[in-house]
Amino acid sequence: MIFCDGVGIGSRDPAVNPFFRARLPTLRGLLDGELPSLHHRRARTDHTTLLPLDANLGMPGLPQSGTGQTALFTGENGARLIGKHFGPYLYSTLKPVVAEKHVFRRLSERGRSVRFANAFPQRFFEYIERRPGRLSVTTFACLHTGLLLLREKELRSGEAVSADLTGEGWHALGYPDMPVIEPAEAGRRLVRLLGRHDFVLFEYWKTDHAGHSGSMAEAVASLEHLDALLAGVLETLDRRQHLLLLTSDHGNLEDMSTKTHTRHPVPALIHGHRQAELAAVLETGSDPRDLTHITPALMQLFARSS
């Protein structure tokens, strides 16, 4: 599962939507040449399904990461539970929900091996000691379910992926000799982890950062790096046994006319083994399908493969 922070489905206008400025051959190839847009929210090819998900969760205001990721990774409507959208960090009263119902815990309790593929520098661990309340949904889930957060060692050995994909950002974090890799190699690493784990999650935050920056150049670069990551994934992924799910928590990057989040739908891109089955589970029930449907659908898929 590749989680891309702040990626919605927007207009086809290249003046505001970097999807229609960037070179994205891999994504176009998956969708028969047609990129996701408000006019093309759904697509189905032989091996890929694109579905829109509502990120608004039935609440007014702009969706935020803390509540959106709670919904995405637990199946519980975090925004409705606290009466508002909240982020970027996890709202205090949602912590028990995430600790109990995060997809990592639920899969682990069913005997599945899970891996959070992101690597974190020492500075991150020092920061959360000083400010333990400033945790993302996934890092909180790892720390409260006993799942190992990966570090420099795993990144150097190829057992983890840097949040910026290449590892170049580590040079300014006290690791001047950290090897720099191509985004495609980061994608290949993620698939190799599936040789030892049933579920692998990677979080890519540069898309949301680019959306907030207001820089079209940064937005285009973040998408082109993501497309190269996908190229590496598809080069290595075995469609007979591997499933790729790419989704987000709220819109942002797709509308560079604003530096805030949006109320646009977000994509659920499904590719590979049993993709039609997962898509069918997600599409079952009344619309709109939203972020809360992802984790229950994944749990149902895993249950069917037991």
Image (cartoon, rainbow, N blue to C red):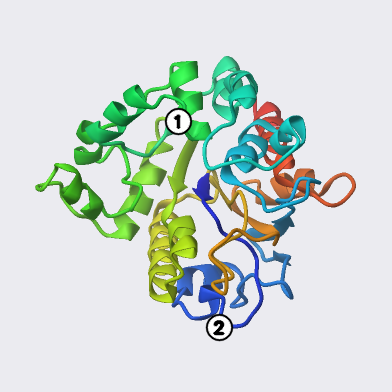
x%, y% of residue 159? 29, 36
In the figure, residue 303 lies in which quadrant? Answer: top right
Mark with earlier residue (1, 2)? 2
User: Can residue 293 be spotted in the picture?
Assistant: yes
Q: Name the residue: 61% across, 48% down.
A: 249
x%, y% of residue 63? 66, 50
Marks counted in the figure total: 2
Q: Name the residue: 72% across, 40% down.
A: 84
Mark 1 lies on residue: 139
x%, y% of residue 114? 48, 28
Residue type for callout 2: Pro
- Where the C terminus falls, by quadrant? top right
x%, y% of residue 275? 66, 50
Q: Nearer the viewer, residue 241 or 297?
A: 297
Q: Name the residue: 68% across, 41% down.
A: 294
Q: Nearer the viewer, residue 194 or 213?
A: 213
Q: Nearer the viewer, residue 64 or 271?
A: 64
Q: Name the residue: 46% across, 24% down.
A: 142
Q: Is residue 101 left or right of residue 61?
A: left
Mark 2 lies on residue: 14
